Amino acid sequence: MRISRVLAAGAAAALALSLTACATSSDGSSTAGDTAGDSAEGGFPVTVEHAFGETTIAEKPTRVTTIGWGNQDVALALGYAPVGVDDQTWSMDGSDGLGVYDWTLDGYAALDAEKPVVFATADGTDFEAIADTQPDIILAGYSGLTEEDYATLSEIAPTIAFPADSAAWLTPWRDVIRIDSAGLGKADEGEELVASLDEQIAAATADSAFAGKTAAFFYMSAADLSTISIYGEGDSRTAFLGDLGFDIPEVAKGADTFYADITAENADQLADVDVIVAYGEGDELLAALRADPLWSTLDAVKNGAVVTVGSGDALSGAVTPTALSIPWMLDEYVGLLNVAAAAAK
């Protein structure tokens, strides 16, 4: 397992915060909205507004279960070791045998906690397995919950869905931290975690060549370039490139959808993309793009401004940012992007 920087840089600070005694409001209660900024230092009960209404957590939870993507990392960063989590390794060719990424395992190790039950996700939400973990709260701030799913989960335990101003699988990582931390009664610590991660991003990109350059994240197959897919600006892959300082190209803007397909005949739609980021292996994708009569006309391809994050490796999963994955992959990812941005003209 790769030793991550998250323990020293990000999560360690957040874990220290979780050990700080939490003050309680005069009436022992608080209400946290979508921004989760007004909870009373962990006082309970706490009410959190989300896409399917509002959820009240009567007492401090001790058994936390998470579903969806990355919610377990918020809990870990704030001192909670979830007893059950969704399988997180859908974007990896293999698995550690458990079904969670290295940065999450580091989070459990930092808390000296037992590894969680991991729910299979191939057939949707595993309600029975979730119930078996006997949760006090279910965190799903980044997820694809339907209203029916939410109703079923709420029969098991108080459930926090994605924010009301977001949509399934399109919640920005900062808002995931905010709404999940609100449910845990740690809204203030959640804000401090967001600020810490923003500081780390600013430090990592201080000398970058990203300013004034556009970038987006794609799915491409070197074996078949007849159609490629671009992730929209609302998807975390492309959105995180914006967090790092890139501009978002027009073709990725204004779409609430997860992704859009672009055929090779419409390659000119990517004319304003300076840096292409995609799942792929080494130089294989760039070579295939340069050999294609249509994609090879793009400046990004001509300049070699193509970043591939190996299909199935841990870094390819980390570009969907979470509270723990950002510090884990930040320097390496920025380094790869810097080389490409410098090549873009």
Image (cartoon, rainbow, N blue to C red):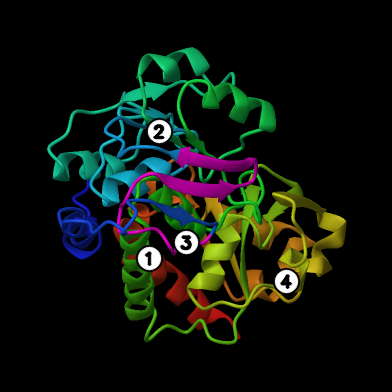
- Image spot of residue 46 (x, y percent): 42, 47
Question: In the structure shown, which secondary structural element does the residue marked by tag 1 occupy?
Answer: helix
Q: Nearer the viewer, mark 3 or mark 1?
A: 1
Disc 4 and disc 2 in contact, CB within 8 angstroms: no
Q: Which residue is mark 3?
A: 174
- Type of residue at label 3? Arg
Which residue lies under the disc numbered 4? 298
Mark 4 lies on a secondary structure that is loop
Q: Is residue 49 magenta?
A: yes
Which residue is drawn at the image coordinates 61% and 26% (left, top)? Answer: 151
Q: Using the numbered discs, state the Cα–Cα distance from disc 3 to disc 2 in whole angstroms.
A: 20 Å
Mark nearer the N terminus (4 vs 1) = 1
**Which amino acid does the dot numbered 1 rest on?**
Glu
Q: Which residues are magenta?
A: 35-56
Looking at the rendered image, the disc whose residue lies closer to the viewer, 4 or 1, is 1
Residue 342 lies in magenta, yes or no? no
Specify which label sits upstream in the sequence, 3 or 1: 3
Residue at image position (51%, 18%) is: 126
Q: Which residue is identified by label 1?
A: 191
